[in-house]
Image (cartoon, rainbow, N blue to C red):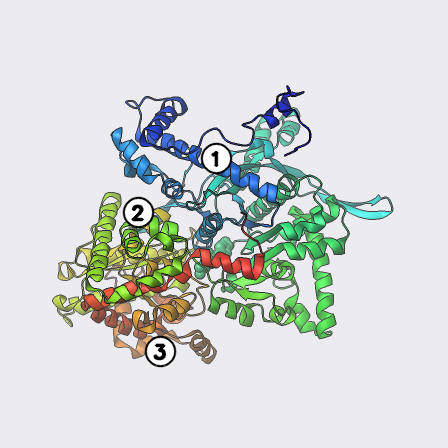
Amino acid sequence: MSTESHDETAVPADAATAVKTHPLATAPVAGPPTSVDGFVKEFLRELNFGQGVTLAQSTVNDQYLALARTVRHYLMARWLETSRRQFEQQTKGVAYLSAEYLLGRQLGNALLATDLTEVVEDGLRSLGIDLATLRSQEVEPGLGNGGLGRLAACFIDSLATMGVPCIGYGIRYEYGIFRQTFVDDQQVEQPDGWLALGAPWEFPHPEQAQLIGFGGHTETYDDEGVTRTRWVPAWDVKALPYNYMVPGYLNGRVNTLRLWRAVATDAFDLKIFNAGDFEEAVRSQTFAENISKVLYPEDSTPQGKELRLQQQYFFVAASIKNFVYDVLPEGFDLHELPERIIFQLNDTHPVIGVPELMRVLVDEKKMDWDEAWAITKQCFAYTCHTLLPEALEVWSVDLLGRLLPRHLEIIYRINDEFLAEVREKFGDDELRIRRMSIIQEYPARAVRMAYLATVAGAKVNGVAELHSQLLREKVLPDFDEFYPGKFTNVTNGVTPRRFLRLANPALSELITETIGVGWITDLERLRELEPYAEDEEFRARFAAIKAHNKRRANAVLLERDGFTVPDDHMVDVMVKRLHEYKRQLLKVLHIVTLYDRIVSGEVAAADVTPRTFIFGAKAAAGYAMAKRIIHLINAVGSTVNADPRVEGRLKVLFPPNYNVTLAEKVIPAADLSEQISLAGKEASGTGNMKFALNGALTIGTDDGANVEIRELVGDENFFLFGMSEPEVQALQDAGYRPSAFYESDPTLRRAIDLIASGAFSGGDRSTFEPVVSNLLHQDRFMVLADFASYIAEQDRVDVAYGDQEQWTRSAILNVARTGFFSSDRSMVDYIDRIWHTPPVR
Ligand code: 26W
């Protein structure tokens, strides 16, 4: 603010100055309520004047919307203040570029962040309204597929809580991840119209729209003796930003999540419209708006579809434009860009941002190529989230050249210069050059986006120790050799606000009562719980909370799906995307084995530890095998649940549409967490962390973050089974024959034969034949090889569960020793190793 000789009482010369110098110009007029009465007044005002209904007329949805708007008013003052300070201090910030954000419901988190839960609860009660009912009304924004999207949501929560400036950039999909239903035990996808009942958390800013071009051609021109290139797109789309609040926990900070929506440009419509083709004008509008219409529900198998590349370029270009032209102050010297921003690439989905920033700097800002490249290389960092070769994105040169001709030219030049450097370092080793080229030649010319990200990124990280190691040794070994120091690890984490404090209020209260509230923002303090594992009274309370959480999950599942979870059962949970590498089939074979033991009379039902198995999993709509596995789980469930011989002993529940909201209820109820991927396939896993933090014991392979969980909680508090990654590799190299395991293991043979016999498909042997035959003849993820070890370990789980005191001791130690997996710690690691961004005071 200017402090020059300025007469405060003078009448400002024009209206704009009047606005800027008004005493209330920078401070919002309303803060949070100081009393229950204050809240009630503001809530009723929103209901009456915002929603336009009286209390008597209002529906639950009216009340929910009015409450959400009331709460967001309280956050608004902090949001404005956070933005103002960050702008004034001009410090370095993070731009998290992610095609997915799996946010979960907003209301509970907003109340927690502002400490308003009690005021609101009391106020609503005085009006005869139940807060929990309104919370249930919220439809979660499911703008992500699974781990990668949920991780983005945890990270922005942590950055806000730590006061680190961050803008999350992404896409405002009109339809998020599909709503899953089951018809005849099979998955049917329904559209997820999350916006249908109102979107009280978003703030559209049409005045900040950006134009994003596509297609066309490039041309060179003479610019005062310098030859420059410009891109002449053939068509464009308007990107409209929608802002969302990202409140820090009790710290007065609110960061921003900015999601882009595609709409047709007026010019685009008019041209066609004026040519007299009204229908075509509408069609082209639809075409433009398709870009942000729906989240691709694929997980780990990119489809290479044109619309997907359009989505990627659309949101990344809009974000970079927004940052360079609107967020940075006027006159900012772009040579200092690396001191102001780091663009974190959440997997390869936003990697087209690399040539886009080059295009902005070189073509638009007329910077010298070498200078621009030096800047760009410091402004990006890349996180890889997978090890599956089929999940590494490549874009065909043909498609890229058509859709983004200038970007393809830029990528070629980056590649030429990069390969020249490789030659310089390693000589003319043509095999190596071909291996490292950003452009793949076979089976078709295509851009390897992970390579581009690695060449452009200041740092490249994996998401768990083992994953980062395998990334360096197996996926990108040439690059690791070429760029010493570029590769690093940041082990994933989860936000303790949502996944412990909000999801598990009973345990949170016990923890706070025992060690104080500090753990919510400093999760390592859970260590202070360790001695209480030996405290009998504490153990009793801890066990009572688990029982309470089971009853709570039971109530939710009963209302939602008509399911019941018996009080006296071990709750054994496997929730995650359905993928063969995650091995839901191994879990099925275990259930079938237990079932067979009882019905064949091998074991008396009374001697089997009663278990309820809970599955949650969506399969990509086009992933036939995954959908068949869902069918099989449901079929086994139907048979087992209807068989009186196993009643009271085995129960299989598969609530459809597993999402963040359901996770918050199911995870705190779990006794056993299933993390059973083939070693070397699960990059990290984050569900595994949520379960351990909520006092479930893990049965798991030496994979992803399981390795670190086991190291921290101790071998005696973790059920390890299966081959290690080197053992998997050795078996692979030796030539894996699944049928050999089938032939030599009678238990395995019986389980598979039972499925093959049609026992779970009304006698029809054909239903699951593809699953059985795949297991016997391919079994890419070595389910059969790990079966015996899994069953043996599960039998040890049963024995361990028999000693409830000891089990609870272990569960407490799991909670006490997994504070490391807070996403706050992940953020500290990113800041130290990659971003170097200080918090803003
Ligand atoms: C459609 C293309 C595609 C390809 C890969 C979509 C999504 C992906 C992601 C890489 C899949 C994903 O979500 N990966 C998960 O990321 C989590 C967060 O780091 C890890 O915990 C999981 O292990 C990893 O599978």
**Kind of residue indicated by mark 3:** Ala
Percent coordinates x, y for residue 94 in the rendering? 56, 50
From mark 1 to mark 2, how far is it between C-alphas? 48 Å
Q: Nearer the viewer, residue 543 or 628?
A: 543
Percent coordinates x, y for residue 651 in the rendering? 21, 58
The mark closer to the camera, 3 or 1, is 1
> Total label count?
3
In the shown orientation, is residue 409 left or right of residue 715?
right
Task: Pick whichever of labels 3 and 2 is earlier in the sequence.
Answer: 2
The mark closer to the camera, 1 or 2, is 1
Task: Kindly indicate the quadrant of the structure image that contains residue 344.
Answer: bottom right
Mark 3, residue position: 740
Dot 3 crowding, Cα within 10 Å, few <14, some 14–19, many 20+:
few
**Kind of residue indicated by mark 1:** Ala
Q: Identify the residue at horizontal 37%, vertical 24% (top origin).
A: 45
For residue 183, which numbered disc appears in the image?
A: 2
Q: Work out whether 653 lies above or below 20.
A: below
From mark 3 to mark 1, how far is it between C-alphas? 67 Å
In the shown orientation, is residue 189 left or right of residue 9?
left
Percent coordinates x, y for residue 139 in the rendering? 37, 39
SS for callout 2: strand
Mark 1, residue position: 77
Q: Nearer the viewer, residue 595 or 22?
A: 22
**CB under 8 Å between discs 3 and 2:** no
